[in-house]
Amino acid sequence: MMQDLHDLTEEQRAIMATARAFTDEHVRPFTAQWDRDSHFEPSLIRQLGDLGFLGMLLPTEYDGLGLDARSYLVALEEVAVADASVAVMMSVHNSLPTQMLNAFGTDAQKQRWLAPMARGELLGAFALSEPDAGSDASAVRCQARRDGDSWVVNGTKAWVTSGTHAGVVIAMIRTDSPDARKGSKGVSAFILTPDLAGFSVGKKEDKMGMRASPTVQLVFDEMRVPADRMLGAEGMGFIYAMRSLEHGRLGIAAQAIGIARAAFEAARAYANERKQFGTPIAEFQGIQFKLADMATRITAARSMLHEVAAAKDRGVPVSAEVSMCKLFASETAMWVTTQAVQVFGGYGYVKDYPVERYFRDAKVTEIYEGTSEVQRIIIGRAVSAGK
């Protein structure tokens, strides 16, 4: 379902082909088993790094590829078609920790962390949410107190993608006083690594979908963090996180489109094989209408995403448009996967066929990195103000 990608450059076509060849060999044959076992395959980190897929948006001086957003999104969609769990690892790494370090880090921080992250020697994670702070991310309670040349941190982060294997975690932690809260202006960003004393991985979530992507709590118990691990200015962490989530939401949109495309392609193939009343069901108008609507929504979501990504690359403010992409693509994924299950009928409801996995994987794209309700708030505020 790639007809709307006729204007890709030769380089982008090569990237897409590379992603497809890689996933055909190293991902697709194992996806169903990884899902059943909730298995994260750590060898993929270095393999994706060797391809350059973990530093696609980073400057070449840090061993990145220095590519534009569209080139990255083309690769990410292709990975998501094969396995959404692998895609979310790639998306979070490229969109949040690496971009935050590149945008707000000191020269020393960038020199120390970015090249190993681009090469796949270190996987990045992002820790904002907490057990009691989800959509209201400014309500984080994880607390740091200054002690000489260090910060001492206590608290728990929740819903951390790749938290079991991350070598670098960008975490939002309060640095204001518990007696004089500053709201979102009291949150700072820190560069954490699992070798810090007091850092531990807590509960691993048993999820409905994306089961091969580990989602965990991170627990900080009197964790001592050197002062030079603060990212950017004190009190700016929440603002940095919100800016970086624009990259993240574009990535989730691409991931959702990849899931939808996988479901569409499976439904189309099945409809041409499955016969009822002596005829392939693809010849029935009811099924053709389903396939037509699925293809149309996928094409529309991708076209919107690539247009907004190109505008962002040009420096155009696109906060509301990014939310539109994330909202429309994630709801497209949920709708398309639902229709795919219907095309398969009873077989769509069993694990012998992949569409039930696509259905499960699609749901979380409407939730993480900003729920659909939050996206509507962002869009609604922008359009009501005439922006």
Image (spheres, rainbow, N blue to C red):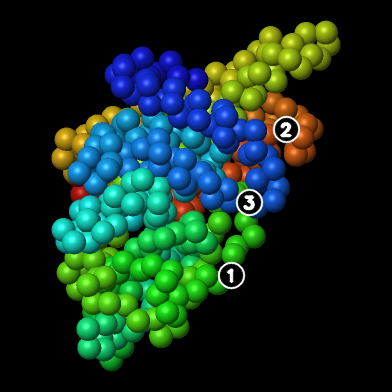
Q: Nearer the viewer, residue 102 or 304?
A: 102
Q: Around disc 1, counting alpha carbons within 10 Å, would you say few (fewer than 14), some (14 to 19), or many (20 or more)?
A: few
Q: Is residue 215 left or right of residue 354?
A: left
For label 2, the SS is loop
| Residue at image location 43% in from the left, 15% down from the top | 3
Q: State the separation of the CA atoms marked 1 and 3.
A: 15 Å
311 lies above or below 379? above
Whichever of labels 3 and 2 marks the residue nearer the N terminus, that label is: 3
Quarter location, residue 2 = top left
Asked if marks 3 and 2 touch (Cβ < 8 Å), the reply is no
Report the amino acid beneath label 1.
Lys
Element at label 3: loop
Circle 2/circle 1 CB separation < 8 Å: no
Q: Amino acid at mark 2?
A: Tyr
Q: Seen in the image, is 114 located left or right of residue 17? A: left
Q: Which residue is mark 2?
A: 353
Closer to the N terminus: mark 2 or mark 1? 1
Task: List the residue tagged with mark 1.
Answer: 203
Q: Which of 68 and 62 lies nearest the eye of the viewer?
A: 62
Q: Nearer the viewer, mark 1 or mark 3?
A: 3
Q: Earlier in the sequence, mark 1 or mark 3?
A: 3
Q: Amino acid at mark 3?
A: His
Residue 163: x %, y % from top left: 48, 61
Residue 169 in the image: above or below residue 121: below
Mark 3, residue position: 39
Q: Residue at x 69, y 18 (%)?
A: 271
